[in-house]
Image (tube, rainbow, N blue to C red):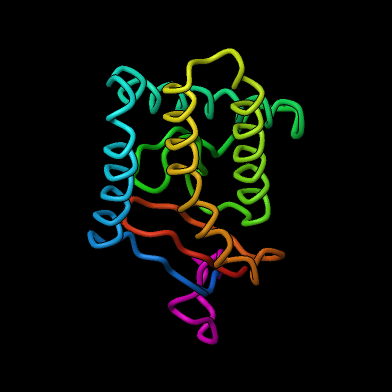
């Protein structure tokens, strides 16, 4: 049996990541996030029925899932190893399971935002106005916190790693 080197630290690990920034998902932020959605939807309730309100979110979750899968298929050319579907308030959909490159997550989220937004705009002539408004509101509501967090991590985009959990979103440097 080999004797460990005395010069090695007891805290040494294979991976040495330095935490640079952490954004906590506090109850205060979650309540404000939910109230904003409720206010926007209540403002529009006068003009619409409840079916688009109830169905828009699941439709967008499925559409985002398909867009991310297609994005990985055409850009990376393989299955999304290390990515899985997660439920959460600010991050819901296909996300990295552990640490992932901020650059990759930013690319995926920006592509998801712009492809989803332009797809909705292209469908505008064929879908009813209430569905269009609900889909746009939910799409923006889902994407804005993600893009805001990634915007805050932009100084570390080149070498940074992101870790998304239910309680916080953290940025690490390798």
Q: Residue at x 43, y 36 (%)?
A: 138
Q: Is residue 3 magenta?
A: yes
Q: Is residue 158 left or right of residue 169?
A: right
Instruction: Identify the magenta region.
Output: 1-16
Q: Is residue 8 left or right of residue 59?
A: right
Instruction: Pick the residue in front: 162 or 127.
Output: 127
Report which quarter residue 10 is drawn in. bottom left
Residue 24 place in picture, x, y as percent: 35, 64
Residue 33 place in picture, x, y as percent: 32, 52
Q: Is residue 119 left or right of residue 142?
A: right
Residue 32 place in picture, x, y as percent: 28, 56
Q: Residue at x 60, y 32 (%)?
A: 116
Q: Residue at x 60, y 70 (%)?
A: 173
Instruction: Pick the residue in front: 141 or 22.
Output: 141
Q: Residue at x 76, y 33 (%)?
A: 75
Q: Quadrant of the C terminus?
A: bottom right
Q: Is residue 114 magenta?
A: no
Residue 40 place in picture, x, y as percent: 34, 42
């Amino acid at each position: 049996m080999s004797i460990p080197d005395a010069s090695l630290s007891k805290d040494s690990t294979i991976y040495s990541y330095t935490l640079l920034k952490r954004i906590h998902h506090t109850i205060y932020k979650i309540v404000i996030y939910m109230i904003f959605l409720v206010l926007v939807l209540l403002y529009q309730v006068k003009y619409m029925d409840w079916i688009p309100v109830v169905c828009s979110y699941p439709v967008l979750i499925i559409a985002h899932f398909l867009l991310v899968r297609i994005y990985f298929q055409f850009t990376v050319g393989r299955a999304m190893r290390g990515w899985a579907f997660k439920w959460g308030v600010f991050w819901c959909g296909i996300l990295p399971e552990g640490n992932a490159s901020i650059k990759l997550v930013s690319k995926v989220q920006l592509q998801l935002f712009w492809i989803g937004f332009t797809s909705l705009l292209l469908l505008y002539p064929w879908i009813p106005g209430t569905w269009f408004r609900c889909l746009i509101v939910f799409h923006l509501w889902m994407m804005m916190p993600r893009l805001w967090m990634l915007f805050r991590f932009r100084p570390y985009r080149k070498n940074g790693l992101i870790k998304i959990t239910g309680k916080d979103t953290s940025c690490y440097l390798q």
